[in-house]
Image (spheres, rainbow, N blue to C red):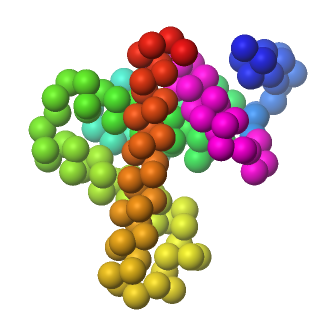
Amino acid sequence: TLLRGIYAAASAAGAVEVSVEDPSPGFAALRDVVDASRAAPLCSVAEGFPDAAEVAKLQARLLLTREQAQRVLEILRLRHLESTGASADDITAFRLACKRRLLRAHEETLLPLESEARKRRLGELYDSAAESYRDCAKKLSTGS
């Protein structure tokens, strides 16, 4: 695809990362699929939530932003959990780790909210992210 060509050209030129300022939802979804397919053979997500070292390694190897590398690892981790019939504890740990990341990413808008409103909004953000992760995982499975 064109995006894979952009990554190849950026790598050949010695780029540190390829970022997209304010991507459209369609492009963000495409990037998730391309990046997750590139990352899948490079990392193991079977052992828990990715740590900072795993994120940094993937970020450098695939020229991703830190946020995109984290997102890709979350996509692959959720796909692994749901395809292997993981325990409720593993699913809960994943959900809570994602929510912690989402809270940090959206703290300007979430922290001023009352506790219950913040929890509700954080739940909505997680549900939206998990839905897009599942859509991406489906496309990875079907090769779309």
x then y, percent, for residue 89:
14, 47
Rendered view: 8 above or below 88 = above
Farthest residue, direction right:
13
Image-quadrant location for residue 77: top left
Q: How many marks?
A: 0
Residue, x 26% and y 32% (percent of image)?
Answer: 81
Pick the front one: 28 or 7: 28
Is there any visible trace of residue 39 in the rendered image? no
Q: Quadrant of the N terminus?
A: top right
Q: Quadrant of the C terminus?
A: top right
x then y, percent, for residue 108:
58, 76
Rendered view: 21 above or below 135 = below
> What secondary structure is the stretch in magenta mostly built from?
helix
Residue, x 46% and y 48% (percent of image)?
Answer: 129
x then y, percent, for residue 79:
34, 29
Image-quadrant location for residue 131: top left
Judged left or right of residue 8, residue 44 is left
**Does the stretch in magenta take in 40?**
yes
Image-quadrant location for residue 82: top left
**Does the stretch in magenta take in 55?**
no
Magenta region: which residues?
20-41
Is there any visible trace of residue 113 in the rendered image? yes
